[in-house]
Amino acid sequence: MTFDAASLSASSGAPQRFGPYYLQELINTGGLAEIWVATASDDRTFAIRRLLEPFQTGFSNRAARQRFESGCEVHKAVHHHELIIGYHDHGKIDGAPYCLMEFVESSNLKLLLARQDPVLGEFVGNILIDMAIALEHMHDCGYLHLDFKPENVLVSRNGNVKLCDFDLSQPKPDKPKKSSGISGTPLYMAPEQLRGDAFDHRADIFAFGVSAYEVLTGEKPFPGESPEDIQSAHASGLLDPIRELNPDVPKKLEAIIHKCLSIEPDDRYPYMSVVVRDLQTELYVDSP
């Protein structure tokens, strides 16, 4: 997996043995899993994502284990693309579910935005196009991402993008379908998701729009402190035009992102491939 060197924690001593791997540095700890820089006996370097210990046992934690396993299986199915974080293996070691992944130095887009990193100004066109291509690839593979946000977009110092974290991914339905529960990050979820209505791949297109809007303006299009606040913002249908916040954004690019952010799914782009086409036409940026 890819991470900013500045985010690596200081070593707490000798590497920890984890099956055939040595855990060198704890990179990040989230709500479900922790991620380590790890080395193998042949000195190759990987990232290991490991389910947190409290979730590893117990009937009440079965859903967390299933979610982690499902994310690994989706990752395995979609990783054969240069814009998806590399997958090597997953399984259990000493009862701990894990996923062995690619490790390359970089940072997630959320951190880059927070520190107004110069890489955004230099490569913003490539980043937007590659984000869209990564989502297009997932949909072509038959999956929705359902947690598309800057935190799950990894960017190297030369602007290369890798999409990660597939724990919430679901098979792409033939027609809009209700989910058994509402899960995700509310600020990036489509209105129909937050309402508990049926949704399809156009929910990812909305999430792409939110992320692109944030990249271009530094602001959320529909801010709120709670899901209810965000639903109210959606219901108003009002958002600050991108060019009012960043006059340097071309009018056609603004129109593309605003179309992704349409409240009604039928008013959005029908497919990510069309988003990619329009972005490439407008930005004239070479993409891998």
Image (cartoon, rainbow, N blue to C red):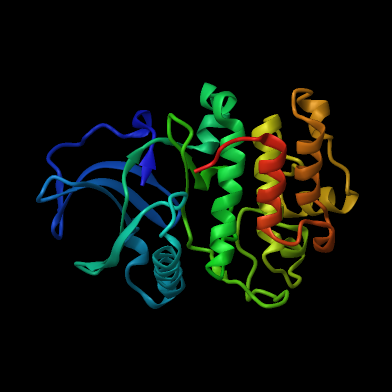
Expressed as whole percent of the image width and height from the top left, the position of residue 240 reads: 84, 35
In percent of width and height, residue 181 lies at: 63, 71
Label count reads 0
269 versus 6 height, above or below:
below
Q: Is residue 133 above or below residue 271?
A: above
Q: Is residue 221 above or below residue 274?
A: above
Please name whichever residue, 1 or 256, is drawn nearer the observer in this view of the structure.
Answer: 256
Q: Could you say where residue 31 lies in the image, as x and y percent from the top left?
A: 45, 54
Question: In this rendering, would 281 be left or right of 83?
Answer: right
Q: Residue at x 53, y 21 (%)?
A: 118
> Can the viewer see residue 187?
no
Name the residue at the left extreme: 41
Q: Give the image quarter of residue 74.
A: bottom left
Is residue 11 or residue 120 the one in the foreground? 120
Would you say 127 lies left or right of 61 here?
right
Q: Residue at x 15, y 37 (%)?
A: 13
Q: Position of residue 196 (x, y in %)?
A: 73, 69
Q: Residue at x 36, y 54 (%)?
A: 86
Q: Is residue 178 visible?
A: yes
Say above or below: 121 vs 19.
above
